[in-house]
Amino acid sequence: MNLFVIGWNLPKEHHPMAWAELRRMTEVYPQLDPETFWYHSSPCGTIFTASMHTASQAAAPRRYVMQNNDQVVFYSGLPIDPTGAYPAHHAEALSAHWDQLAKSLEGQHVIIRAIDDPLRLELMTDFLGMEQVYYSQQGDTWLISNSVQLIEQINGSSALDPLG
C-alpha cells in the first residue's frame, strides 16, 4: 500500500500540516511505515507531493517512489506490463517508459509524475479506474489522494459534497 497526497497551489504554509496528517494515517493503516515517508515540493511551491507506504522489505520487489533533481514518479496499486519488457512495479521503470504506459500497462493502479521544469503534474489511472483517486477543489487549490479521509483531515472539513 502506498498512501499519497498531492497539492496543486496548496499554500506553502499548509505543507507541514499536510505532512502531519499523512503521518497520522498510521492510526488508520498500521501497515504504513513512517520510515518510508517522503515529500517533494516544486521550487515555486505550486506542486506538493508526499506519500508513505508499507515497509520496503514487505513491499519488495515493489519500489513505489522514484525521485531525482526535477521530478518524482510514484504509484499506488499494482501496474503490470504484460510483455515483461520492464518491471512495472518499479517507479524507476515507470519513469523511463512514461510515454508507453497508457498503451501497455494492465492491472489496477494510479501513477503520478510531478516535474519541476517545466512545471507539470500528470496522473494516469488504470483503464477501468479501479484504483481509487479522490480530489477536493477549493478555488485554484486542489488536493488529490487515494484517501478521502486524508483529504478531509487536511481540509478540515467533513461535509458531504452533494455534487460528488
Image (cartoon, rainbow, N blue to C red):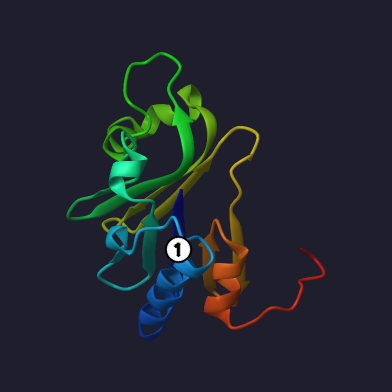
Give the residue at the far bottom of this rendering: 13
Q: Position of residue 29 (x, y in %)?
A: 50, 60
Q: Position of residue 17 (x, y in %)?
A: 41, 81
Decide if residue 153 is on the left or right side of residue 67: right
Residue toward you, 88 or 113 = 88
Residue at 77 percent across and 73 percent down: it is 160
Q: Position of residue 102 (x, y in %)?
A: 49, 30
Residue toward you, 3 or 42 = 3
Q: Which residue is mark 1?
A: 6
Residue at 52 percent across and 77 percent down: it is 154
127 up-or-down from 10: above or below: above
Q: Residues within 10 Å of mark 1 (few under 14, many from 20)?
A: many
Give the residue at the far top of this rendering: 83
Residue 138 location, quadrant: bottom right
158 up-or-down from 73: above or below: below
Decide if residue 59 is on the left or right side of residue 31: left
